[in-house]
Image (tube, helix red, strand yellow):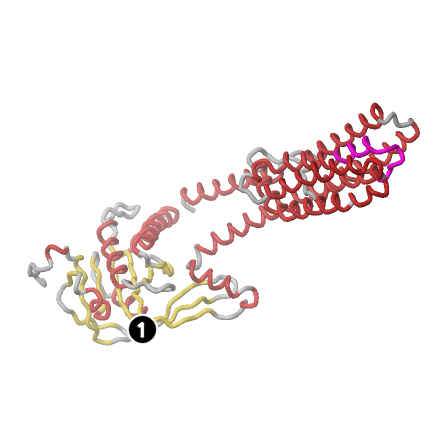
Amino acid sequence: MSGRIRIAAWSENVAQLTQERKFRGSAPGRLRFAPDLEPAFAEDHFVRSLAFIRFAIILAIALYAAFGVLDLFIVPDVAGSIWIVRYAIVCPVALAVLGFTFTHRFKLIAQPILSGLAALCGLGIVAMVAIANPSASALYYAGLLVIPWAYSVLRLRFVYATAAAATILVGYEVVAIWVKHTPPDILVNNNFFFLSSVIVGVAAGYTIERGMRAEFLQRRLIDRERHRSDTLLQNILPQAIIDRLKARGEGGTGRRLAEALDEVTVLFADAVGFTVQAGKTPADDLVAALDGLFSRFDALADRYGLEKIKTIGDAYMAVAGAPEPHPDHAEAAADMALAIIEELEDARWPSGDPILWRVGIASGPVVAGVIGQRKFAYDLWGDTVNLASRLQSHGQPGRILVSESAVAHLEARYEFGPRLVVELKGNGPTQARFLLSRERLESRSIPRSTA
């Protein structure tokens, strides 16, 4: 393994450890992640809770308004005063908050606003208790519903729900002790139920948020692993093929993905004298040299829009026009071939010897597809592939041998040598030409030598 590969592997391991520490979050029992992860959870919590929040507010408005009918039977003497609390204060504020949930600013202060609404709903009932006569116990019991509503239905975060519950509880104590002068036995009884409601709400709120945080971490881990697998898959298959395989879904497992392509251009490049160099070069140095060379080839393929198919020993195979059509496939392959000759001029073997390349190019139809069950590979087959490979093997060091089918696409813009007849195994006498350069626009009218 080369030093560059070792460094990349070490960096990936460090990154994974860092992510794991983030995902572990805070100390057990504490509803808090690391500072760089907590905002992501807050965003996720908001998005997943928004529908519940709106439903909870609508439910609160409906119940608050509906219970106003009972006031006529429970506290008829002060029903009008209580209605002021219900219909002039709590319900309008709740409607305003509901409308605010449809604005983009709501997300920034959602939890404080909802905590304030929950506290207002509870304190509204406390105010009704203060206005009503001592026998209106139904109002008091209605207040017990607000706390579990805030913890569970409203999807308040645990801290904000607890702040609202504490505010309601303190408000009730003030009214019960200093305003209503509630007898001790009744006060103890009421506080027992009130605190029981708070305890149930705390347990529910804590459990819900803890579960949401655990689910958030699990989805983050799954997304990270999916990203890693997608990245690995992109190093094996073209993105277009990956997208097609995903589109098939799980039901497509085992089915072949194959297609006939009418017009592509295949490029083969091979290093001259590799066998001799392999015999006198240490394995690590040889692999490092090939890794560096093929990395430069990959960059050229990306630049000119070719798809790398595979490496075969010291040979590099790429295609233009597959798996996605390319209107100028022959030009793209010719430009990459010229770049190989020009830009890798400085390449040297570990021994110091220069690296010369033979390049073969052919255009025509191919069959393309994905093969394999455990180790997938996207490959090409057909006479066009064989022709490009044999032109490369019969070419000359530092030169590009091109089939007549590719020349037909290129001769208007590129300069070629004279027509040759090459004896190719399996093809017999085959016409081909050496690609010399890409002509400049201003020099097209100047006659060129074919020598």
Q: Please state which of residues 341 and 23 is positioned toward the viewer in this rendering.
A: 23
Taking the image as shown, residue 334 lies to the left or right of residue 286, namely: left
Say above or below: 89 vs 430.
above
The x and y percentages for residue 280 are 32, 50
Is 5 in front, or is 331? 331
Q: Locate the C terminus and report the quarter of the image it occupies.
A: bottom left
Q: How many marks?
A: 1
> Can you identify the residue that label 1 sits on?
383
Please state which amino acid type lies under the numbered disc 1.
Asp
Q: Which residue lies furthest to the right in this view?
A: 185
In the image, is residue 193 above or below residue 447?
Answer: above
The residue at 17%/65% (across/down) is: 411
Q: Position of residue 137 (x, y in %)?
A: 87, 37
Front-most of residues 314 and 189: 189
**Badge 1 density bin: few <14, some 14–19, many ≥20, Cα 10 Å:** some
> Is residue 432 a member of the stretch shown in magenta?
no
- Front residue of 42 and 322: 42
Magenta segment's dominant SS is helix
User: Taking 239 as reference, is 93 above or below it?
Assistant: above
Q: Is residue 130 above or below residue 437?
A: above
Secondary structure state at the residue bearing disc 1? helix
* Picture coordinates of residue 248, whole percent (x, y): 52, 66
Magenta residues (range): 124-138
Side of 380 relative to 21 (left or right): left
Quadrant in the rendering for residue 115:
top right
Q: Does the magenta stretch include residue 130?
A: yes
The image quadrant of residue 197 is: top right
Question: Residue at (69%, 34%) from the top-left corner?
Answer: 159
Q: Where is residue 340 in the image (x, y as percent from the top left)?
A: 26, 54
